[in-house]
Amino acid sequence: MCGILLVKSNQDLPLEQHLRTLSTLKSRGPDRTRYQYENGIFIAQVVLHITGTDDYYKHEHKNFLAYNGEIYNYKELGNYSNDIEFVDEWLSTWMGSLGMGMD
């Protein structure tokens, strides 16, 4: 179980307000909290890590992927250390094939 919070606002809301709201989701994902806030958009995720490693979350990524789910057979799909690496790569490939790169 994970939690995802997305806020889009025309007002410049303080980061602390978003983080307070995010803290209400912490029980859904006690293993890792991550967020990004720019241009009036706050997106955050709390992660409950079930399978694989949490290596994906230790590095910066070009895009912010908030994913709630578990792909248990991700190892059968390629050389991935966890399922979110598979989802990230699959989305990048799929969007690229449609000419909609994830930039």
Image (spheres, rainbow, N blue to C red):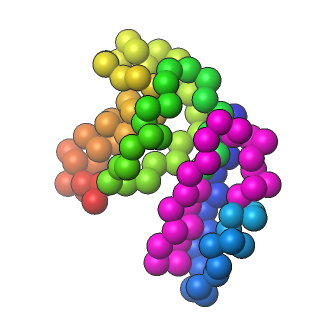
Please name the residue shown 56% across and 27% down the image. 70
Left or right: 72, with 24 as reference point: left
Question: Which of the image's four quarters has the N terminus?
Answer: top right
Q: Residue furthest bottom?
A: 11
Asked if residue 99 is positioned above or below residue 92 in the image, the reply reads below
Q: Position of residue 12 (x, y in %)?
A: 59, 85
Relative to the observer, which residue lies in front, 8 or 50? 50
Find the residue positioned furthest to the front: 58
Determine whether 73 is above or below 61 in the image: above
Residue at 69% from the left image edge and 40% from the top image edge: 29
Whether residue 3 appears in magenta in the rendering, the answer is: no
The quarter of the rendered structure image containing the C terminus is: bottom left
- Residue at 44% x, 32% y is 55
Q: Foreground residue, 49 or 70?
A: 49
Residue 9 x %, y %: 60, 79
Viewer-side residue, 33 vs 25? 33
Q: Is residue 36 magenta?
A: yes
84 relative position to 70: left or right = left
The magenta region covers 22-44
Q: Is any atom of residue 98 visible in this view?
A: no
Q: Please give the name of the residue rendered at 38% of the width and 12% of the height, measured from the top-left corner.
A: 76
Q: Is residue 15 visible?
A: yes
The number of discs equals 0
Q: Is residue 71 above or below residue 1?
A: above
Residue 28, by quadrant, is top right
Give the left or right position of residue 97, taking residue 40 as reference: left
